[in-house]
Amino acid sequence: MKKSLLLIPLIIISCKKDPVVADTSNKDSLAVTPQTDSTSIADSVALKKKDSLINNAPATKEVLRKGVMRNIKDDQIIRTADAEQLPFTLGEEFTKEGQVLVLKITNYNKPAIKAKISTKNKDFNIRINQIKMPNGEFDGPFSQEMTHEVKGKGEVWLMIGQNNMASGNTTGNFTVSVE
């Protein structure tokens, strides 16, 4: 029984088909050989399966959940993004009351910024509290949507948190879209 278990991997490896390699020694280096439709369809299906495996991997899900360029210090979540990536939408979650998201957008050189907070929770008490300009000036508070003139070029900060003048749930998932 043990011997047969050891033979299974050898049988699988020996049955694996290698792709056919055409001899191109007498052809021009720029010659292109046409590919059959069945091969391209099989390749695209294999690629989709591979993408599905990567996107559903536990490590990928953890990166998507925690985010890239994300730091947490006390009740402050700091996310950093480059202005070259604009427009973008990022997902975030407040897990306890009193949390604040500071979205730092580096290398910002446009004359205005537009941001919008979206959430599925109708009772979510969240807004854009302040914006910090590249020249150090602050402005705010705003609502869940804002368009603001940006003075100077450099790093722009968006501070997002609860509205102290309103009531509602302060924990949950939301997205921030920036243009």
Image (spheres, helix red, strand yellow):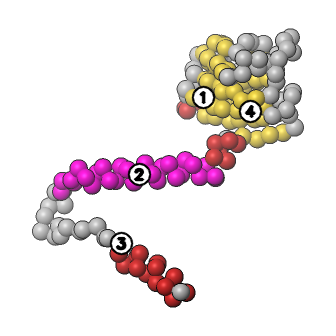
Q: Distance between the residues labelled 4 and 3?
A: 47 Å
Residue 103 placed where, x, y %? Answer: 71, 29
Q: Which of marks 2 and 3 is in front?
A: 3
Q: How far apart are marks 2 and 3 (CA)?
A: 19 Å
On the rendered structure, is 22 left or right of 169?
left
Does dot 2 land on a helix, a strand or a loop? helix
Q: Nearer the viewer, mark 1 or mark 2?
A: 2
Residue 86 placed where, x, y %? Answer: 55, 28
Residue type highlighted by circle 2: Leu
N-terminal-most mark, 4 or 3: 3
- The residue carrying mark 1 is 89
Say if 122 sits above or below 60 in the image: above
Where, by quadrant of the figure, is residue 175 drawn? Answer: top right
Q: Is residue 53 covered in magenta?
A: yes
In the rendered structure, which segment of residues is drawn in magenta?
A: 33-60
Residue type highlighted by circle 4: Glu
Specify the farthest residue to the left.
26
- The residue carrying mark 2 is 47
The residue closer to the viewer here, 7 or 49, is: 7
- The residue carrying mark 3 is 16
N-terminal-most mark, 1 or 2: 2
Residue type highlighted by circle 1: Thr
Where, by quadrant of the figure, is residue 87 drawn? Answer: top right
The residue located at (55%, 32%) in the rendering is 84
Q: Do the residues labelled 4 and 2 touch (CB within 8 Å)?
A: no
The residue closer to the viewer here, 164 or 5, is: 5
On the rendered structure, is 53 left or right of 66?
left
Q: How far apart are marks 1 and 4 (CA)?
A: 14 Å
